[in-house]
Amino acid sequence: MGPRSAAALLLGVITWLVAPLAAPASADGYGATVKALDSVFAQQVVRIAPGEAVEWVNDGRAPHTVTADDASWDSGELAPGGEFTRTFEEPGIFTYYCRYHGSPGVGMIGTVAVGDVALPGPTGSVGPGVEQPPTNFSDTVRVPHDVPTIQEAVDEVEPGGMVLIAPGVYEEQVTVTTPYVTIRGENRTTTIIDGDFERANGIQVIEADGVVIQNLTARNNLLNGFYWSRVHGYWGSYLTAYNNGDYGVFAHDSVYGQFDHSWASGSPDSGFYIGQCYPCHAVITDVIATNNAAGFSGTNAGGDLAIINSEWTGNLAGIVPNTLDSELYPPQRDAVIAGNYVHDNGNPDAPTLALTYPAFGTGILVTGGRDNLVAQNLVEDSATYGILVMPIYDANLWVTSDNVVRDNIVRRSGQADLGLGAPSVGGDCFAGNDAATSQPAAIELLYPCSGVRPFPAGGGSMAPTITSLARYLEVLGGTVPGGDWRTQPAPPPQPQMAGNPAAAPPLIAIGGENVPQPFRIRDPHSIRAESGPTVSKEIAIMGVPLATSWGGLLIGLYGYVLPFVLYATWVAVAIWDLIRQESAPMPHRTRWMLVVMIVPFIGPLLYYAFGHSPIPRQLRLVLTVGGLVAYLLFLGLGILLS
């Protein structure tokens, strides 16, 4: 490990300990700080006194802008971590939006109330789930027969109607705010929305319920191919999204939806994404994701959410539900991942981001999630772990619990077929899996789903956690390995929707009634596995692979072995002291040995006692520093007594 990596690790540890001492800025009521999360400003309304300033901080993972509705001021593009401050001298209502994720009045919007002025409009009078579905179909608007552009057609169509698009390359960004419309291409492969690496999204649906998009391709957009935001009811079917700069097919802060019969590739974040929803009431089925950083990513998404019967191959990582503080509703929980064919993930040439790179090589990875079911999947040839459950650290430490991994077929994984990363806080279980290796070893005996649990309070192996940390340090402040999302290969021609797209009627998607559709999970034994390259087993010491880097190995040995060395030293000193105290009565010596054996475990026991909620920074500080001080005091006491 070089000096920069060592310094970065030391800085990370110091930050982890000291960060609790800094109180977070208030962002509600009369606060003057607004966080730009992914696709939402939090809080959306902030009130200040005349002459005060508002600071916007991009705490999300995508770029944002802060743009006045009347165009009188604009922050310009704010990269993740960027800030913008503006002082408001006069009383009034000032509304703004993000140009990438909304437009005036819709999408990612916010309001600054300056002084004692009334807010406009009754709160909650409009929004997702409010629009009533139409009772009849409306007219079809044809592109380019009736109007020359898709945007003009979308602006003209009525609820219950359809925009039908002839084959061609359409160089535009389409924003949909009309509910219950169908947007359909006549030919999935040759009806293309092209962003020319200049426009943000192919089609973005903002607060318009029940919009169906079918039989289209979106490519070369700076952010997303197809994007639904804050809707109640959505359906994406027979879509192809490739070489887009963030996500392929994306639903955020939306409920009652379905993605099916679709392809996504060349995304540096994920091919398919459903996030910031609980309960989501959503299904992803019969899709293919390849050559993405993650095939599926779902931040803080769960509750009647199913990722099923699909193929995830050739990505940096396959299926990655995750917990982050940058979005609402943490932790991620209560999703079903089943009937999938997940194979050959660990593609070093896939485009990726620093946040995703630590997931390298995993087939199915649950980070910081709870109450998820991972069942009946066929997972083959993962570069690192086949199925892995592990914690994640963001603003808070999110540990896993009550995830069920059962009845999967997992084979030929580079490090282990099954894995549970420490720390976990109990309830994670493994049963009935056809797998050869695990980390920790004998994982189904140590963490069964029924019967006696040797470790009811949690546990797991530090190897996956340390390996993930090592990979993060590899890219910290440097270049992330992987290819350029702009130059990834185009997909082969994809299947068309059934029947004649031009003759089929519009589809009215009504959340909770006909979307999502019922489903049945397939048996993994029915999946026809492809013959492809297999993964070589990585050489590892205590589960930490040598192949990651020498720096990673050093971190692994330090993190894995040091506690055992300290504990052995602690016990050895105490035994030495007891030997020297031959005259001491036996009860006294027995009590002293019990203290010696138990004291080092007080910290972990307290940790697990608080395990079913995110560990607050202040508590982490007390446990970490207090445990260290107590340990050193007892160790010093033993040395003095000897």
Image: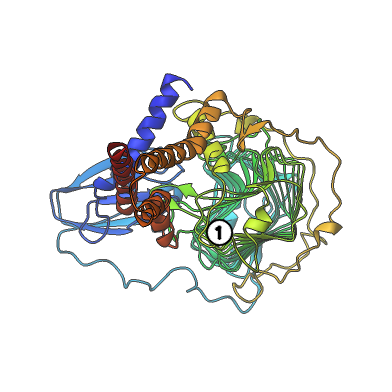
Name the image quarter holding residue 498.
Answer: bottom right
Q: Position of residue 189 (x, y in %)?
A: 76, 45
- Of 100 and 397, nearer the camera is 397
- The colour scheme used here is rainbow
Residue under circle 1?
455
- Mark yes or no: residue 107 visible: no
Say which residue appears at 46% left-offset and 43% top-offset: 62
Q: Position of residue 211 (x, y in %)?
A: 59, 63
Three-letter amino acid code at the position of disc 1: Phe
Q: Position of residue 242 (x, y in %)?
A: 66, 41
Say which residue appears at 34% left-offset and 54% top-offset: 588
- Mark yes or no: residue 359 visible: yes
Extreme bottom residue here?
A: 135
- Of 546 and 315, nearer the camera is 546
Q: Position of residue 521 (x, y in %)?
A: 75, 65
- Of 160 and 397, nearer the camera is 397
Question: Left or right of 368: which side holds 379?
Answer: right
Question: Left or right of 70: which side holds 471?
Answer: right
Say which residue appears at 30% left-offset and 46% top-offset: 630
Disc 1: CA contacts within 10 A as few (<14), some (14-19) or many (>=20) = some
- Quadrant holding the C terminus: top left
Name the image quarter holding residue 237.
Answer: bottom right
| Element type where label 1 sits in the image | loop
Extreme front residue here?
A: 583
